[in-house]
Image (cartoon, rainbow, N blue to C red):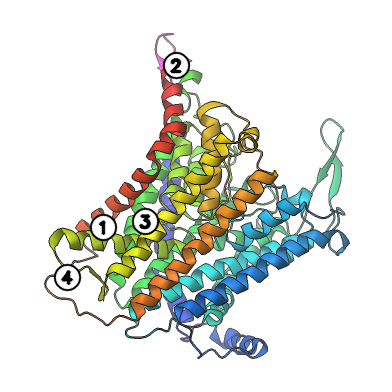
Amino acid sequence: MTLNGWMQIAAYFITLILLVKPLGLYMKKAYQGERTFLSPILSPVERLLYRLGGIAPDDEMNWATYAAVMLLFNLVGILFLYLLQQIQGVLPLNPQHLGAVAPDLAFNTAVSFVTNTNWQNYGGESTMSDLTQMLGMTVQNFLSAATGMAILMAFIRGFTRHNTRLLGNFWVDLTRSVLYILLPLSILLAMVFVSQGVVQTFSPTVIVNNSQSSPQTIALGPVASQLAIKHLGTNGGGFFNANAAHPFENPNPLTDFLLVLSQTAIPAALTYTFGKMVGDTKQGWALLAVMIIFLAVFTGMAYVAESTGNPHLAVLGVDQTANLLQPGGNMEGKEVRFGIARSALFAVTTTATSNGAVDSMHDSFTPLGGLAPMVMMLLGEVILGGVGSGLYGMLVFVIVAVFIAGLMVGRTPEYLGKKIEVFEMKMAALLILIMPLTVLGLTALAVVTAPGQSAVLNPGPHGFSEILYAFTSQGNNNGSAFAGLSGNNLFYNLTGALAMLVGRFGLAVPTLALAGSLANKKFVPPSAGTLSTTSGLFLGWLSGVILLVGALNFVPALALGPMIEQLMMIGR
């Protein structure tokens, strides 16, 4: 650990917090159809898109219609992306003349990008053509992110509206997410990346002789344009197999800082958008405070663990008696140009959001260092989380915390003027339980079956951690991998696709049902007995509920993996 490392981490948090209010306010205006500085350019485009699509923007939907349209739209996306992979061999912009992708891998990949997971059981530059990367992956990076943001808008309207069944129009929310937020930010960020040396070209691969005079194929492609939305939309699927550790995707510390910042900026700013839309910005700041505290604690945990390294690689001091820590910390699997502090920060933020991009190999982290990013997912990816999905996941925990607190003091639980009753708690319980059941169930299936065991490259607790991490990543629509797991086989492609579908749409539909129920309720004015949900006491209570639910669900599984591995490392 160094002062420089802590300063880099602190600089990130300060910059992130400074972005929250201006970006959050802009998004609030964009979603509510208010004038922004981009309105003169984008409003005519928005109206044109509605006319071309035959959409009446004032025709709002109830929760069931909103959910049905959302599901149908994403089903079409899966079918299109699957077909594109099957016929890429006869399509243009394929300089390496890559053929059709294997059916099970193509299905897994199509589900992965449509669900905002971007789990990759393939090497990007050696499997997908430039056209597939652009027309398939990059387009879905925009649309899958916009889908999560649209669902969040419908959920927020559940709190702001009263005595109605209408939650807005999915097509309008989707269009505004892409047109006013994701697209302008992506263009700006891509231009910055190109200026820093990120590749953006249609040129074919280059073959050069390396220092040993052996021919080496260097893949090129339209990388910067995909890289920007990959992080802004918390997608994470890299153009190259090495992802953000590849020098053509992430050339220097400045681009690395921008990648970390961009993958957390929108999820953080949406808390302020929420506060403005419900008419109480303190609510948004309160939620952000909980998220930032969790993120800071686990980032610090990863940094300390990786800086400490493996005690069995320590060296003797000058007096030949005192053991010193592993020199330089645990640099295995990390890029020298980023170092331990930036690698730890990237690892935790990429799993706190549903991004999943990596600038270091998580499989090479120490047991506690690898535990930190894994826990960020196991908590339900509500510590910032994916764009849209993270905040509505956190709001579900708020509802549960309010309900439990109400029971403890003998009052009907209320949140933002809405009574939390039986149906709301059924939906909230369902939303909290779906992910653990999916992750733990598929992990158990993998460890007791031959197809699941055959893909594990490391025996013992670390191999179990790899399996647990894989299904945690897919079940939470994250997409990062521990590696060390040969996931490109029929078993993992199909079970992984199932985990991603359930993790995305199995949660989205109950979320919309919950929003519909809240919107249909009447407003209950606050009284002297109303629980304050912005006080330090409630924020501590909310944090405790999140940790308690996560512990009850996953501590036994973590004990079989990273916890026992840590004990074995320090005790043998």
| Residue corresponding to mark 4 | 530
The span from disc 2 to disc 1 (Cα, nearest Å) is: 40 Å
Percent x, y of residue 531: 18, 66
| Residue corresponding to mark 3 | 291
Q: Toward the viewer: 330 or 403? A: 403
| Residue corresponding to mark 2 | 572
Q: Earlier in the sequence, mark 1 or mark 4?
A: 4
Rendered residue at 65%/33% (across/down): 454
Percent x, y of residue 358: 58, 47
- Number of numbered tags placed on the structure image: 4
Q: Earlier in the sequence, mark 3 or mark 1?
A: 3
Q: Which mark is residue 539?
A: 1
Magenta extent? 314-325
Q: Residue furthest left?
A: 528
Q: Do the residues bearing badges 4 and 3 touch, measured as CB atoms within 8 Å?
A: no
Percent x, y of residue 566: 43, 28
Q: Earlier in the sequence, mark 2 or mark 1?
A: 1
Of labels 4 and 3, the one closer to you = 4
The span from disc 4 to disc 3 (Cα, nearest Å) is: 24 Å
The magenta stretch spans residue 316: yes
Q: Do the residues bearing badges 2 and 4 touch, measured as CB atoms within 8 Å?
A: no
Callout 1 crowding tier (Cα within 10 Å): few <14, some 14–19, many ≥20: some
- The disc labelled 3 sits on which kind of residue? Met
Residue 129 shows in this picture: yes
Q: Earlier in the sequence, mark 2 or mark 4?
A: 4
The span from disc 2 to disc 3 (Cα, nearest Å) is: 36 Å
